[in-house]
Image (cartoon, rainbow, N blue to C red):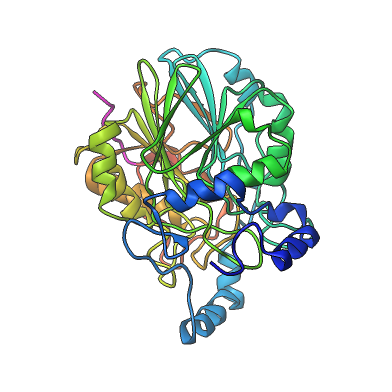
């Protein structure tokens, strides 16, 4: 494959000049393993079903006009301060009564305490999801707690190598700890380049598992794509993750479009006590790689065998401006989808720990205080800005 392997002299010279945040290309045995993957063909990783990854041609021009329209831009960001949970560290100091607790830190970053262990999904503590500190989407709210104050983490799980999921400053900070990193195939090249020792990597292809601290972590399929540099070569895999402890099971979607494989994941690894599902940064211009709230709810139900069991935590919204939709729309859409299905959805403020199997989960529509109301007003939602009542998990 001309120009893509580790031995191309021109590629080697160009790699030496690129910013550290671009990461590193897979090479050596890692590259050989990628080529042997059943999910790698024609020189790239393949999706479980076909997917368009970005607008092109005329649709790109149309998208640009919509994206930069002044009135639309104003609605894509909060108009006030995003309310954060004020006592995160004090709350985390007490062990979860049920043995399972989730703390959404914003976007797709979730601290999961499961059966006495701590798993940190897609930690992004940086100010921008970009290779450059002076450009790119900027954080819309502070992180609820510093990474240093968070305390020991048993395993860090990465879904894929896009900047809003794999953050160089966060990885470098975590590299100085003893944590294990579970990553999709190929992503380990970036982490080693940034100082993570190879013996602390668990690099998995789809449907492969690793045992870490008594937890079973399985990389499961997703419908997305990868890439950090100028050229997107599709040489690192993207994944969702199923994590099983002795008593509890959780699922993190990473980034994905809807596809029938959620049913297979649920049948193999579920049902789950909680799912963390991407419901933001969607658009009609890339319908195959990010889910709408309605699609996210459909995925949650598929993962639970068609039943509205467990709790769904909506992720990948509220922290960065990455799509044309209004800032509050993913939250509103998730509430509507949950009400329609009778499903249990948790709506924590960033930094608010909750136990998915407890009698109640956070349900306040907190984003409304910081958002521009739609022209038709907010949908009816019960008393005092709270969401629809949903049945507790059996």
Q: Is residue 389 magenta?
A: yes
Q: Relative to 343, is 138 above or below? A: below
Q: Residue at x 61, y 37 (%)?
A: 84
| Residue 100 highlighted magenta (yes or no) | no
Instruction: Work out whether 272 lies above or below 123.
Output: above
Asked whether the viewer can see residue 358, the reply is yes
**Residue 380: in sight, yes or no?**
no
Left or right: where does residue 113 sit relative to residue 259?
right
Q: Position of residue 124 (x, y in %)?
A: 63, 43
Q: Is residue 274 left or right of residue 88?
A: left
In front of the other: 12 or 20: 12
**Is 314 rendered above or below residue 218?**
below
Residue at x 44%, y 32% (from the top left corner): 362
Q: Please provide the residue range marked out in magenta.
A: 388-394
Q: In the rendered view, does 22 fall on the left or right side of 43? A: right
Q: Is residue 280 above or below residue 122?
A: below
Nearest the viewer among 231 and 253 is: 231
Q: Residue furthest left?
A: 306
Percent of width and height locating residue 352 = 54, 31
Q: Is residue 79 left or right of residue 99?
A: right
Q: Nearer the viewer, residue 125 or 158?
A: 158
List x then y, in percent, for residue 109.
56, 39
Question: Residue at 29% of width from left, 35% of height from top?
Answer: 390
> In the rendering, at what x and y percent does residue 222 appear?
39, 50
Q: Nearer the viewer, residue 43 or 296?
A: 43
Residue lying at 43% horizontally and 43% vertically, measured from the top left? 205
Report the quarter where the C terminus lies.
top left
Q: Quarter-wise, where is residue 391 in the image?
A: top left
């Amino acid at each position: 494959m001309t120009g893509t392997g580790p031995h191309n002299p021109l590629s080697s010279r160009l790699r030496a000049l690129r910013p550290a945040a671009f990461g590193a290309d897979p090479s050596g045995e890692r590259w050989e393993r990628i080529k042997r993957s059943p999910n790698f063909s024609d020189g790239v990783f393949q999706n479980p079903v076909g997917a368009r990854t970005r607008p092109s041609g005329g649709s790109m021009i149309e998208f640009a006009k919509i994206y930069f329209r002044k009135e639309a831009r104003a609605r894509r960001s909060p108009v006030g301060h995003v309310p954060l949970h004020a006592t995160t560290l004090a709350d985390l100091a007490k062990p979860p009564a049920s043995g399972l607790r989730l703390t959404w830190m914003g976007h797709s970053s979730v601290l999961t305490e499961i059966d006495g262990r701590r798993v940190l999904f897609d930690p992004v503590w940086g100010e921008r999801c970009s290779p450059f500190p002076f450009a790119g989407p900027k954080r819309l709210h502070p992180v609820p707690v510093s990474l240093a104050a968070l305390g020991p983490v048993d395993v860090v799980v990465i879904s894929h190598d896009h900047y809003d999921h794999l953050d160089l400053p966060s990885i470098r900070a975590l590299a100085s700890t003893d944590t294990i990193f579970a990553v999709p195939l190929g992503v380990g090249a970036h982490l080693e380049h940034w100082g993570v020792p190879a013996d602390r990597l668990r690099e998995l292809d789809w449907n492969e598992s690793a045992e870490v601290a008594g937890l079973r972590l399985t990389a499961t399929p997703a419908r997305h794509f990868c890439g950090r540099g100028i050229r997107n070569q599709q040489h690192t895999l993207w994944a969702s993750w199923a994590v099983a402890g002795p008593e509890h099971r959780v699922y993190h979607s990473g980034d994905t479009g809807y596809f029938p494989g959620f049913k297979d994941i649920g049948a193999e690894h579920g049902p789950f006590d909680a799912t963390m599902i991407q419901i933001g940064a969607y658009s009609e211009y890339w319908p195959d790689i990010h889910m709408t709230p309605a699609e996210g709810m459909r995925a949650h139900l598929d993962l639970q065998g068609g039943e509205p069991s467990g709790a769904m935590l909506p992720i990948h919204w509220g922290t960065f401006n990455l799509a044309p939709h209004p800032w509050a729309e993913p939250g509103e859409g998730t509430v509507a989808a949950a009400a329609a299905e009778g499903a249990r959805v948790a709506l924590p403020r960033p930094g608010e720990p909750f136990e998915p199997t407890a009698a109640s989960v956070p349900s306040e529509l907190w984003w409304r205080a910081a958002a521009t109301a739609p022209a038709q007003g907010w949908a009816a939602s019960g008393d005092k800005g709270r969401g629809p009542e949903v049945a507790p998990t059996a």
